[in-house]
Amino acid sequence: MGNALAERLVAAKHDVWGLRRRPAHLPEGVNRIEADLAVGASLRDLPGALDKVVYCAGPGGPDDAHYRTAYVEGLSRLVEALEQQAQRPQRIIFVSSTSVFAQTNGAWVDESSATEPRAHGGLRLLEAEDVLRHAPFPGTVVRFAGIYGPRRTRLLERVRASQAVYQAGPPRYTNRIHRDDCAGVLHHLLDLEAPEDLYLGVDSEPAEELEVMKWLAGSLGAHPPRPAHGDERKRGRGSNKRCRNQRLLDSGYAFQYPSFREGYMGLIRELS
């Protein structure tokens, strides 16, 4: 997502800086900063007069310590470094996740809905959002749902291999957004004069998990998903919610892929 955004910004003739531990992987045209958000000393020489900052990090592993380092501590160190260098960015955008919601009954959620995450990932993201809320710079949080697209095709590959299974019981709603729309949303918010402090980054059609898998199977000519059995059954059904993107639409953003159908169809064509 970060690289896709950087490519858009470079194409729009912005002066773009990218911070990574291995900056060689940054797109062409991006000014490279070799630094580690887990090491405060490596942030001492940030470029001056940064206008806007997008914090789009990923944990180095699945456990709580990695999430705390990547989000809570990393964002705190970056804010501290900007303060120490007397930087005054117009806005920091923090990439969060809809995992901060814990609704399990298919309820509709929006930016005003309760956030009561149970897993450590959602808890640390919510903690990092609070870091931004108390930073001395204007901040905007974007909570993205399940991201799919180039190199994010796990569900598509599972269906294509006839390995897709579903959990029996009431409908389980899922929310998603194409990688290109993630970059598009961030670019859009960077261009807004006065964005809100929180947006849900999801497409316009929350969908039942089974419906998505059946549609993929039909489009791929694969076997339909089968009900889970034995060890495939999950102990709990986990999150089950429908996320609204009305605030994002009201801000003027137009989705390239408004539902899973348009997004996955493009990926299927690439596989053909």
Image: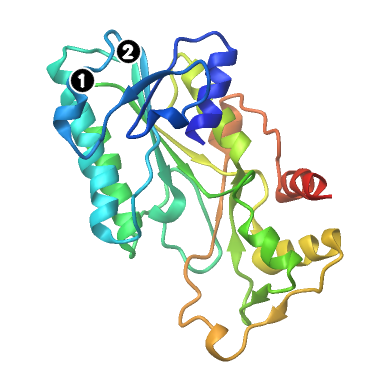
Amino acid under label 2?
A: Leu
> How many neighbours does mark 2 have within 10 angstroms: few (below 14), some (14-19), or many (20 or more)?
some
Q: Residue at x 47, y 70 (%)?
A: 238
Residue 8 located left or right of residue 51? right
Q: CA distance from mark 2 to mark 1?
A: 9 Å
The answer to which image quadrant residue 16 occupies is top left
Q: Nearer the viewer, residue 255 or 85?
A: 85
In the image, residue 237 sits, relative to residue 219, either above or below, namely below
Mark 1 and mark 2 in contact (Cβ < 8 Å)? Answer: yes
Location of residue 37 with respect to 82 vertically, above or below: below
Image coords of residue 241 (percent x, y):
53, 60
User: What residue do we see at 32% from left, 34% from top?
Assistant: 21
**Residue highlighted by disc 2:** 50
Q: Nearer the viewer, residue 248 or 39?
A: 39
Q: Residue at x 57, y 46 (%)?
A: 244
Q: In terms of secondary structure, where does tag 1 sit?
A: helix
* 153 or 99, nearer to the observer: 153
